[in-house]
Amino acid sequence: MVEIRKYTVKSKKINLKVAIVTQDTKIIGTIHIPGGRLTDFLNDKGTGEAELFIPITDASIYAKGSDTMLYFTNFLSINKQHITFIFPLEDDSEIKK
């Protein structure tokens, strides 16, 4: 019997540095989107619960309105429903606390 394996096609992902603001925190980190626009990625409903979360790498977490970093982690996953707003950063000089 011949075994048939299914492989998914990996798409090239774009690394995008972003600022994400929630009700209580601000997160500066990198998201990895599968090409296209940030808005298309955020509006994609997907087919399962995994699409409810956005993976973020190199995430610095601040209390909203504070210059003091509360926590840094190499990986963080945030529920899209908790995002108040998100925007791409060109460089660190755009970060306003």
Image (spheres, rainbow, N blue to C red):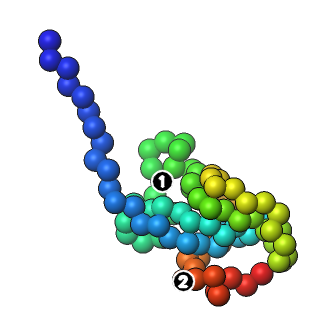
Q: CA distance from mark 1 to mark 2?
A: 27 Å
Q: Residue at x 28, y 37 (%)?
A: 7
Relative to 16, 75 lies left or right: right
Question: Is residue 38 rendered to the left or right of residue 59?
Answer: left
Quarter occupied by the C terminus: bottom right
Residue 24 at least partly seen: no
Q: Quadrant of residue 14?
A: bottom left
Q: Which mark is residue 66?
A: none
Question: What residue occupies the far bottom of the structure in this picture?
Answer: 93
Can you give x and y, in whole percent of width and height, for residue 74 in the image?
64, 55
Name the kind of residue labelled 2 in the image.
Glu
Q: Residue type at mark 1? A: Lys
Residue occupying the point 44% across, 44% down: 47
Point out the frontmost of discs 1 and 2: 2
Which quadrant holds the N terminus?
top left
Q: Residue at x 58, y 51 (%)?
A: 53
Q: Residues within 10 Å of mark 2 (few under 14, many from 20)?
A: few
Foreground of the two, 94 or 58 = 58
Q: Which mark is residue 45?
A: 1
**Is there CB contact under 8 Å for labels 1 and 2?**
no
Secondary structure beneath dot 1 equals: loop
| Residue that numbered label 2 is attached to | 90
| Dot 2: element | loop
Mark closer to the chain start, 1 or 2: 1
In the rendered structure, the answer to whether residue 39 lies left or right of residue 28 reads left
